[in-house]
Every structure is written in structure tokens, then in C-alpha cells.
Image (spheres, rainbow, N blue to C red):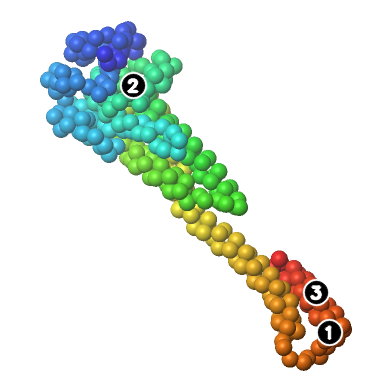
Amino acid sequence: MGKTRLYRKGELVDRDFPVSEITKHVKDHSAVVWFDLCAPSQDEIGLLRDELGLHELAIEDAFTERQRPKVDRYPTHLFMSVYAVQYVDHEIKACEVDLFVGKNVLVTVRESEDYDLAGVERRWDSAPSLASSGVGFLLHGLLDDVVDGHYAAAQKLDDDIEALEDHIYEEKPHVGRRALQLRRALVQLRRVALPMREVLGSLLHREHELVDDTMMPYYLDVKDHTLFTAELTESMRELVTNLREAEVAVQGNRLNSIMKKVTSWAAIIAVPTAISGYYGMNVPYPGFEQKWGVWVSTLGIFGLSYLLYLMFKRRDWL
């Protein structure tokens, strides 16, 4: 059974009543009705089409997966499509929520139980003084909950990106796979969060007669949250793009440092190799078969090697 609520004159008078009573309450112009359908059956789809007189194109959109967040206007109602999101294990989980907004009825259609409406109901119960604004009040509670979910997901994603930045300077960063995962999550979040600016902007037009003067400041607050989320995702987009480039740059600098050290040690090792090679010739040379020749070669090896070590150390190559 879907969740239901009935308001009269700004007061909650009934809840969780059978969906079969919806039509009777909707015909009462003094009543404001909300009911929710989760993965609705064919009979419930028929209720939307036959009893409530909702447009067939809106119903088709509601049961077509992955609609873009939008607002469509029909003669007797509005159709909206939004997405509630959760950020779990570095992934964005989105649940489509379609809305039919009439003069005195709000219908929510969820594709699954992944989005819990308990938070929305708490918002409604926490502001009973605004219930006299009718459907605009109910719609605000749901949109506020959805947009706050976008913002919470964006904040968690931002924290993970900042943490990944710190890993770049570790000895073995390997941030490539994680950066790709975060980028994919960010793309999914932007796809559902950015269009909310247009959705809120459309609702604030006076032609809809949905948002009265009482609810206008609250809708403007929700719109501000959408703009802030959009700005946050925009900054994260640039940051994620630069993460891989920063890792490559750090690895390049580290490789240059390693190459300098290897080259320096190779130069030092080349000194004893050259001296021992010279004294290893099978021909007479200065100090041939003489004790002082052994000492000269030995001192030459250690002296020149130490001199090169000091020189490379001073240049910060070692």
C-alpha cells in the first residue's frame, strides 16, 4: 500500500488511508492530497490515467526509466522528474522520483525503495504552520529533501577528492583508478544536480501559480542550495581533471630525482672501474710491479670517488 496524506484547511486530518479513496478526496476542493506509488502496478497506473485524468505523455514519461530532471506543463497539472541520490562506497546511487502536481494533489512515483520518504515527512511535520499553502508546501518539502541529498553527496565526494590529493605525494600514490572512479561519480552527480537549477527556476515563475508569497522565500532557499551544489561540482570537476595530471607530474619529478641519483652513483663507480682497468693492463706503466703503484691506485679510487660524492651531494643529486 502506498503512503497517503490528507490535509484540510492547513491541517493534517488523515494519513495512510487506502489509495482507493484518493479519487473521492481529490474531488473535494477544500482538501489537499498526497499519495506515493513505489514501483506501481498496472492498476495503480490506471488510477493515474482514468481517475485523476493525468496526461498520457506525462504517465509515459513517469514509467520510462532515466528521464532528465525537468518540468513539463499540461493543462491541468505539472509533471516533474527529479533524482534523489546517495553517495556510498565512492559511487552515486540515484533513484528517480516522478511528480504529478495538481491544484490539490501531489503524486510521487518512485522507481524503488532506495529513496526513503521518511525525511520528507519529517519536514512536513516540522512546519505545520506552512501547510495552508497546499500543494506548494508539500512539493517544497520533497524538493528540499532531494536538493539537500545532492549537497550532502557533493560534500562527501569533495572530501574524498581532497583526501586523494594528499595521497599523490606518498611514495606509491597509484591514484589513477580511484581518480577515475571519483570522476565517474562526479559525472553522475552533475547529471542529476545541475538541471535542478532549471527546475527550481521554472517553478518560481508566477504563471504556475504554485508558489504563493508565503512559500516563495523557502523555494528561493532551495534554489540557492542548488546553485551552491552546482558551484561545488564545477570546482570538483576541475580538481578531478587535474588529479591525474598532478600524479604524472609528481612521478616525473620523482623519476628525475631517481635518475640523478643513479647517474651520480654510476659516475662514482666509474672511477674505480677506470683506475683498476688502467692498472690491469698487461703492459708496463708508472708504478708497474711497485708497491707505491698499488697505493697510488688505491688512494686514487677512494680520493676521486669521495670528491665526486661531495660534489654531487652539494648539488643535491644524492
Q: Residue at x 28, y 27 (%)?
A: 111
The mark that comes first in sequence, 3 or 2, is: 2
- Residue 153: x percent and y percent? 45, 35
Q: Indicate the quadrant where residue 212 lies.
A: top left
Q: Amino acid at mark 2?
A: Leu
For label 1, the SS is: helix
The mark that comes first in sequence, 1 or 2, is: 2
Check if mark 1's residue and mark 3's residue have beta carbons within 8 Å. Answer: no
Q: Residues within 10 Å of mark 1 (few under 14, many from 20)?
A: some
Q: Indicate the quadrant where residue 125 lies.
A: top left
- Residue 245: x percent and y percent? 49, 58
Q: Amino acid at mark 3?
A: Phe
Question: Does residue 28 appear in the picture of this structure?
Answer: no
Question: Does residue 118 appear in the picture of this structure?
Answer: yes
Q: Residue at x 53, y 56 (%)?
A: 247
For label 3, the SS is: helix
Left or right: where does residue 300 sit relative to residue 190?
right
Quadrant in which the N terminus appears: top left
- Residue 126: x percent and y percent? 44, 16
The residue to which callout 1 is attached is 293
Check if mark 1's residue and mark 2's residue have beta carbons within 8 Å. Answer: no
Number of numbered tags placed on the structure image:
3
In depth, the one of 7 and 88 nearer the eye is: 88
Q: Residues within 10 Å of mark 2 (few under 14, many from 20)?
A: many
- Residue 219: x percent and y percent? 38, 30
Q: Residues within 10 Å of mark 3 (few under 14, many from 20)?
A: some
In depth, the one of 78 and 153 nearer the eye is: 153
Mark 3, mark 2: which one is toward the viewer? 3
The residue to which callout 2 is attached is 138
The residue to which callout 3 is attached is 302
